[in-house]
Image (spheres, helix red, strand yellow):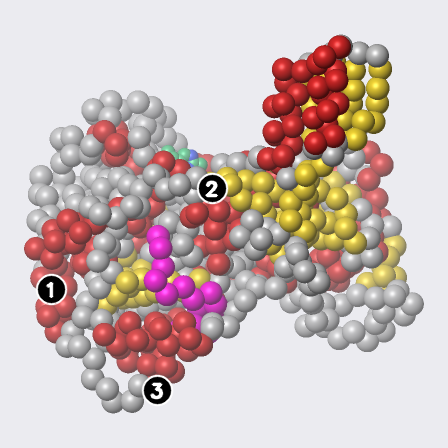
Amino acid sequence: MSQMDGHTGRDGTQAEMLTGAEIVLRALTDQGVDTIFGYPGGAVLPIYDAIHAQDRVRHILVRHEQGAGHMAEGYARSTGKCGVALATSGPGATNMVTPIADALMDSIPMVVITGQVPTHLIGSDAFQEADTVGITRACTKHNYLVRDVNDLARIIHEAFYIATSGRPGPVVIDIPKNVQFARGPYVGPGAIEHRTYRPRTVPVDHRIEEAVALMAKAERPIIYSGGGVINSGPKASEALRELARVTGFPVTSTLMGLGAFPASSPQWLGMLGMHGSFEANNAMHDCDVMICVGARFDDRVTGRLDAFSPGSKKIHIDIDPSSINKNVRADVPIVADCGEALSALVAAWGARGRQKGPDLSAWREQIEQWRARKCFAYPGSEAIIKPQYAIERLYALTRDRDVYITTEVGQHQMWAAQFFHFDQPNRWMTSGGLGTMGYGLPAAVGVQAAHPSALVIDIAGDASVQMTMQEISTAIQHDLPIKIFILNNEWMGMVRQWQQLLHGERYSHSYSDSLPDFVKLAEAYGAHGIRCDSPAGLDDAILEMINTPRPVIFDCRVEKAENCFPMIPSGAAHNEMILGAITGNEIGEAGKVLV
Amino acid sequence: MTKAPKSPRAQKSTARSGVREDPASAYDMTDAKEQIEHRTLACIVDNEPGVLARVVGLFSARGYNIESLTVAEIDRNAHQSRITIVTSGTNHILEQIEQQLLRLVPVARVIDVTQSGGIERELALVKVAGQGERRVEALRISEIFRARVIDTTNESFIFEVTGASMKIDQFVELMRPLGLVEVSRTGVLSIQRGKEKGG
Ligand SMILES: Cc1ncc(C[n+]2csc(CCOP(=O)(O)OP(=O)(O)O)c2C)c(N)n1
């Protein structure tokens, strides 16, 4: 945080006078930003001049603005800090829309700065004019068009505050070119108090007491944790572990929440939801008290709502009041920061003294019976690499490393969630809410920019990876040695799976035709290419990837027709999981219309 | 194919779920058999550019109804506007609307005018054309409704009438057989009763 020396006044009297572009760079520096991801153009040239004139904020030049946005997301998710992206007006801003929407869905703190045509040209269909605040209104937490340079510094600091506080999210600041040139007063971050925006973070005491009273009588309790625990910061993950330790309750988590609770703990049930574990989903279905923390009862998690955990009392902790009672009624709603609420629960649980709660051993035994089904088991093969096996080996061979995983979207994403295990938060970057193919590669670049010596792997699919492949060039330019591990099944595997199960095996346009030679492609970009198609050679190939100090594209040829199980079909209940490979019409008509 | 067997407890609880009113899927939320209610909400917002678009955009993006909407600045110094929205939905949806509105950064507070017994008024301009008996009758009814005549020709009146929406509806219905030409309405305005500032 910066000092206010020399430029105190909101009245402008003593404030230092800078150009709008200089104000942008100064404000970023004062916000502690060390890296931004961007792409130049006419409407941001003054800002690029200001970037050129300083060396405190590093600029990573991308190849497509979508890449910049996902890099900022990866940077943010892996550090807990706010990601920053920069783009020009018109096409620069519209290319940024997907990552902005992605960040909104997954509550990622991000500030996006876009250039705009000069104020006097706004509304005239000027060259590269787009209504950026109009276009992004529905996919930002908040956005600004800065018409007056006198407001610029305050708006930038406010944007960071809004992006990072409460339920985090993306904020867009659209700055017309003449405002970038104009001189105005610089004010430091100071203490931000927004006129209308005041997120509540501290839980109400009596709700904590109600929650603990329920928990103390629970015979079949479960903790269901989500991305909010990660967003809340490392303290929240610690508090979650502590709560699980003192209560002995089993823990499951959403896709976004992986890593908040250690996968190595015997209390860990694995991920829940559509492709979650048998034990997690059955425990959710049969529990009598559910503690949902930082998750939002998404349809991928609940399955059929009227059959969702029908016999349980639900405690729901969320910083966003609109998440509570949106899909599922909460018996004990707790509006608060996850970390604060979890710590309060731990304290209140401890304050009960030595009272003995119900015996959980029957529940534990039941869970072990479900676990014994080994729902992720798959038929092995000596001839072909099974995608699950590839992830298992990748996990085994990177266990002792400082590893960060990103993914694209599809079957490989679900296998990564099932077979790669996380013991720490902020190690797992995936597009959960929006499900954006093309997220993983640029996100890995952003993660690597924040953690230069870590092992950063994008677990990819052959289709997804082609959506933002050009960012490998960014990785080469900036010496960011990301590893792109493609589970190449020559299909849009997840689409193929749905077509097989739901659309009578009509494989309409889901074959990845005309795939590039990924090894040659790597070489063309100046990266290292590896191909592997035999289980016997896989370990050596993975080690070669890990030990290459440059970006690597790994073309891992896997079984083409493998399906991702278990699966709760859309519109089915948690205890109606499909466990093995099927080809029939297990999914009812009502389920087919769902996505 | 292997289908997971249901545990005995699971079966019991599924049966119990039969009596629950929750819809089968998030996609069916609006089909819930719950009662549809009308509700008047007032939002006090920072009067910044785009704030109305945010509020209206929220309603269209999430599929909520707007039956009427009025907006004007109410405090120039504090840059505040009051947006009064009449909407409808199940109790659950109305609760969501309130929470979703509060998520918008420039929204300072949301007042449930209906449930807090606030006052709602609307103003309408009603044009009626006719001669003879019908014209006399229109004027007579307008007096009962305390409507003012604000424009007259030999063959027409324009009435200005204020009141609760229902009163205006009734007035318009009574004018229909008497030569109703057109109606212009402001939408509902609201304020809290008593000496306190609203919200
Ligand atoms: C931008 C975008 N377009 C379309 C989709 C729909 N979609 C979801 S998964 C998928 C196939 C992904 O194929 P691939 O990347 O090869 O991964 P696999 O499922 O084979 O592991 C598609 C097309 C999406 N999620 N994102």
- Which numbered disc covers residue B37? 2
Residue at the image position 40 percent from the left and 38 percent from the top:
B30
User: Residue A591, position in %: x, y?
Assistant: 26, 34
Three-letter code, disc 1: Gln
**The magenta stretch spans which residues?**
A328-343
Three-letter code, disc 2: Glu
**Disc 3 residue crowd, few under 14, some 14–19, many 20+, Cα 10 Å:** few
Depth check: give the residue in front, A496 or A453.
A496
Label 2 resides on the chain identified as B
Above or below: residue A121 compared with residue A394: above
SS at mark 1?
A: helix
Q: Is residue A583 left or right of residue A480?
A: left
Q: Quadrant of the C terminus of chain A?
A: top left
Contact (Cβ within 8 Å) of mark 3 with mark 2? no
Above or below: residue A440 compared with residue A561: below
Q: Is residue B42 left or right of residue B155?
A: left
SS at mark 2?
A: strand
Depth check: give the residue in front, B40 or A562.
B40
Residue at the image position 9 percent from the left and 54 percent from the top:
B7
